[in-house]
Image (spheres, rainbow, N blue to C red):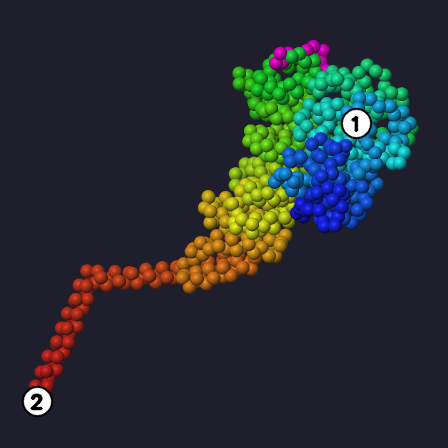
Amino acid sequence: MAEANIAQKDEGQNSAEIGGQEVVVTNRYRILVDSPLPELDLGKAKAYVTRDDKSPKDPLFARICPADAVPRLDILNNLKHMMDANLLRPVEGEGVVWPGGKERRIAIVFRKPDHGVLLPANVAKINPLQPDEMAKTFLAPAVLTLGYMAQRGLSHRAIRADNIYWHGGGRNSILLGDCISHAPAFLQPVLYETIESGMTPPIGRGVGTIRDDFYSLGVTILAMAQGRLPLGGYTDEQIIDAKLARGSFAALMNGERPPFGLRELLRGLLSDDPFERWGLEQLEQWLGGGLRSSVQEVRTGAVERSYEFDGKEYTNSRALANAFGKKWSKAGKIILDAGFEKWLRRGADDSSIADRIRKTLSIGGLPDKSKGADARKVAQACMIMDRFGPVRYQGLVAMPTAMGLMLADAFFRKDAKAIKRIADSISSGAVSDWYTLQGGAEVIIYEAEINQLKQMQHLLKQTAPGYGVERCLYMLNPTYPCLSDILLDNYVQNIRDLMPALENNVKDHGSLPTIVDRHLAAFIACRIKANIDKPLAALDSAHGDPVAIKLGMLGVFARLQSKYGPDHLPFLTQWLAKELEVTVDRVNGKTTRDQLLARVRSVGDTGSLISLHNCLNNDKIIRQDELARKKAVKDFSDAAREISQLESKEFQESAQRMVWRIATGISSSVSTATIAFVVLS
């Protein structure tokens, strides 16, 4: 994302229209900070009047996501191009610095709806929609839009009566509301969610599938047909209990007769079995008048006799699984008890549950009853008792597709225990178990998810920078910004923005607080789309040596600059060049060392990390220097050996004997010559 900025009003513009400060998105959309639109607020996301520089008359508004939100930016581009969909269509979005704080916030610009929502949250009752009106003005455009989303493999996960807007001059159609500014289903009341999603904390519901949207659509249809929300006055727990005991359709009807003409539609959409629930094909047939068969509601997991656990009676295996997930340590002993197995066999709709639990627990040998089953075994038992329910591991409750959201939330809150629990649920295999225990063709459908989890299990075993739970965070959240402290207040979501952000930090502060941390290495490793295992291994082998670490990260940065640019990073390059001058000392030859140092200093001025890396990692120079060093060592060794020999006693005695022999020879020669001279004379 391009960097957003805060701008003051331009000279000559109407101050009443501008209202003071502006926050500019993508250098085009001006969010008027002093012009809020409280009627368009959504959860903690506040709405503001927005102006488009290119089309000033377009009715726009922006929502500023709360700092702790995990917005669905991965689907923004898809939705902004769905021109024919009946959707509150996003126009643009990016990270901005909002006045009054340093944290970057996501701002999402939308086209303003024509009218208000179907059933405002603060309104108890409205005039009910008649079946014909329901089909034409509400259901048909909703089905059309969900069809477009299904074609792209997307889910909405925010369908409810207070997030659907009337559309058109005569309110003859609708727009499905914002599904981007918060995590999937985060703002959904339990009433609108399936049993399994309702049993899960809002951040742990996950993207789900289009099947979840059809369930929420069914609840919305019932609310609009009755002119009010069903089960008014019920707590979340009471709603879940009612759905578990009677099934969603019967629970939501709460003894009332189904609205005229909608019985089959509601039964089909509110089925608690996602594979039996109506989808696009059935809805299109119903709208065309060709489908009148209904789905028979089944109370999955109901048993004849109750089972007491933790002071409460349970007559439903799904409800008991939910309780086991909350008290997993105590459940670890219960699931090994013969009485529990007998209770399951006595009246469960699926008589194989007891056998499947025992078979699963027996893998690797039955646990010691006195110690109880471990967390993974408890999680597996819960999955068998509640096939569609969430993963329940050591107190963690989340749908398997929500692990990334849970991890992002835990990192934002700096909750080390939650981070460890999520990592353990993945590394132990508990999350993978959810997919494999679905059985049948579903395992094939989830092959990609299972393979990704296997990859994360491998990553979690490694402790080096670029691996571990931080790598999993960015792998599971493809649009999540880098949380590295090195980036200071920069909001870096796109890998292309990383090097410019580091350059600006060095420019503003003269240096980086450190050269690498686990978040920065993991973010790069996850986003670069290239194999950087070798430089990551170099970081691991540095063993805390600051120079070796900087040299290793230089290799990573050079790879980034080569792949994404920019070509000129003068401040970062000069700083790193100065920091790494000490590495020149590893060169032994003084002449070569001086030449290399001069080159490092000159390369620092070019702004090219690639050149700096090549300069400091020039294998040819290192080999030549090493050969020269070895030759010098050999020459020195040879000279030292000769000196040692010359100074040795043996050499002195040998030399003395040699001198004596030479002297004797010379003396003999002189004597012979003298005698000869005398004789001749």
Quarter of the figure with residue 35: top right
* Residue 459 seen in render: no
Residue 158 in the image: state x and y as whole percent. 75, 31
Q: Is residue 32 magenta?
A: no
Please report the bounds of the magenta region as a residue range. 300-311
Q: Which residue is mark 2?
A: 681
* In the foreground, 448 or 663: 448
Query: Residue at left 49%, top 59%?
Result: 601
* 647 or 540: nearer the viewer: 540
Q: Residue furthest top?
A: 305
Relative image position of residue 229 (x, y in whole percent) = 79, 22
Q: 114 or 396: nearer the eye?
A: 114
Examine the residues drawn in magenta and state their main secondary structure: strand
Residue 669 position in % (x across, y down): 14, 78
Q: Is residue 644 visible?
A: yes
Amino acid type assigned to the residue bearing label 2 in the image: Ser
Tell which tag, 2 or 1, sits nearer the viewer: 1
Disc 1 element: loop
Element at badge 2? loop
Q: Position of residue 524 (x, y in %)?
A: 59, 45
Q: Is residue 285 left or right of residue 339?
A: right
Q: Residue 607 lies in what quarter of the image? A: bottom right
Residue to which mark 1 is pinned? 120
Q: Amino acid at mark 1?
A: Pro
- Disc 1 crowd rating (10 Å Cα; few below 14, some 14-19, many 20+) is some
Q: Is residue 249 left or right of residue 329?
A: right
Q: Residue at x 81, y 18 (%)?
A: 253
Residue 309, magenta (yes or no): yes
Q: Between disc 2 and disc 1, whose residue precedes?
A: 1
